[in-house]
Image: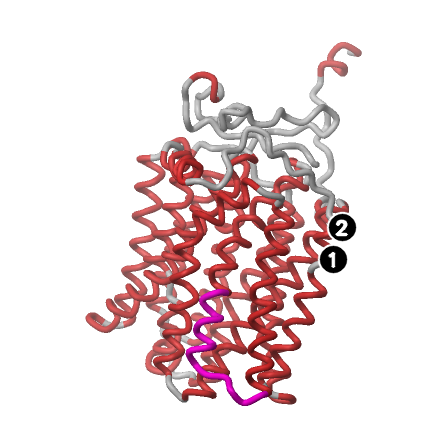
Amino acid sequence: MSESLESAPPARPKHDPFAALRQTSFVLYSLNRIGATIGMAMMQAILAWHVYDVSGSVLNLGFLGLVRFGPSLAMSMIGGAVADTYDRRMVMIASRSVPFAGAALLAVATTGGWVTVPLIFTLSAMMGIAMAFEGPARVALLPAIVKPETFENAVTVSNTMQKLAQTTGPALAGGIIALAGPGASYMAFCVVTLISIPPLLFLRYKHDSSGRKGVSIAAIKEGISFVARRQVLLGAMTLDMFAVIFGGAEALLPVYAADILHTGPAGYGILRTAMQVGAFAMSFVMVMRRPVRQTGRALIYTVIVYGIFTIVFGLARDYMLAIVVYALIGAADQVSVVMRQTTIQLSTPDALRGRVSSVNQVFVGASSQIGAMRAGFVAAVTGATFAVVSGGIGAIVVAALIAWRMPQLFNYEIPRYDPDHEPPAEAGGDGAPPGAAVGTGASGPGDGNPDAPAAPPGRR
């Protein structure tokens, strides 16, 4: 009797939904992230309003997005190499100084009456370049400052806070513009940016520069090659990219609100909000439940569900049904985001996380732009309903193809971590990820399998 009790497996520890928030480093990271996200959401809203207010041109609004997206996309790979070479906190702070300086200049120009559209475009392009450096550094920093067993919880909590901040920023910007004008709103952005910096300075993080190649063409190629040779990484990024390209219905919401559901501007606003409500609700569910270990399988199944809900939304003719289904699309998208980020970050060694994050940033940025173009073009030729429904079918087909052709992603599981024992070893100097692939039949990087996932480093 005693022997059977001794051999029984230990009870699973109780799930702690606030595990990430109990870590000081994550709290400081989150405070910085909330401030920075509110600030950048403010800036995007201010710039769009100001460009239209100065020029009265709808076309200039399109150019505003282009001048910000183009330079950011072009510099992303360099930004990833910088994030892997230098202290990621300092990279983030230096990157934030560019929009701060740009906003200060725009505040002076607006107050002085000499602001022009070319000046706004030029500073917007510089801000886009700065974000190409800030993004990879920010994403790569998170897994290095939290305990590995709490990483999924940290990603979920961080995304929830980010969505709240993204909602708060435009409302704050609009209120300040209404009360005091664009010049004051630029100054408010500067204040929010300054407030967001101190938490990063107090965050405990030790940058390990040993064995890193620095910022070079070879380092950039190494990051691209690392992604290209690993099914887990390439599959997760490709799946997300094509799901957004095919399944994104957001670009056609004005058409659905005005011509299909006949709800007008008020209904359009509620419809857009429904997706965020669904994402928020799912965020809280994911925080309260245990982390998903089979993240690869969950990612693929979630994209299939996302595609099914997209088809239902495309066929919907009842306004209330459309709201519910679009909220479910937001919920599925939130699960996909968390599963993708967890899979990518936990299957990449710390020395390469910046460059891998920059590759993912290129995939995400390109898919958003291409997806909006695809939806608009197909809708113009065949109609909005066919564009949305065919997109949902396309997302399902892509998920099925990737599950078939990239089985290591489908079978990927995050490693088990025992907090009572020493955390897994760091990646070696050759850049190969440590740890073993779970559920893929691989025994680790030493057996020549390039797809063996990495165990993340312990808390620094």
Question: Residue 414 at x, y = what percent?
Answer: 55, 33
Above or below: residue 449 compared with residue 376 = above
Q: The residue tagged with tag 1: helix, strand or loop? A: helix
Give the quadrant of the C terminus.
top right
Instruction: Give the residue type that dot 1 points to.
Output: Pro
Of 329 and 101, which appears nearest the observer? Answer: 101
The total of numbered circles placed on residues is: 2
Identify which amino acid the numbered label 2 is placed on.
Answer: Phe
Q: Nearer the viewer, residue 4 or 371?
A: 371
**Disc ID at residue 198:** 1
Which residue sits at x=37%, y=85%?
57
Q: Position of residue 329 (x, y in %)?
A: 46, 60
> Which dot marks residue 202?
2
- Tell me residue 182's x, y (percent): 58, 84
**Left or right: residue 253 compared with residue 84:** left
Q: CA distance from mark 1 to mark 2?
A: 7 Å
Q: Where does the N terminus fall, quadrant-wise? A: top right
Residue at 45 percent across and 48 percent down: it is 78
Crowd band around label 1 with a 10 angstrom C-alpha radius: few (<14), some (14–19), many (20+): some
| Farthest-out residue, right | 2
Q: Is residue 120 magenta?
A: yes
Q: Residues within 10 Å of mark 2 (few under 14, many from 20)?
A: few
**Magenta segment main secondary structure:** helix
Q: Residue at x 52, y 23 (%)?
A: 436
Circle 1/circle 2 CB separation < 8 Å: yes
* Magenta region, residue range: 112-126
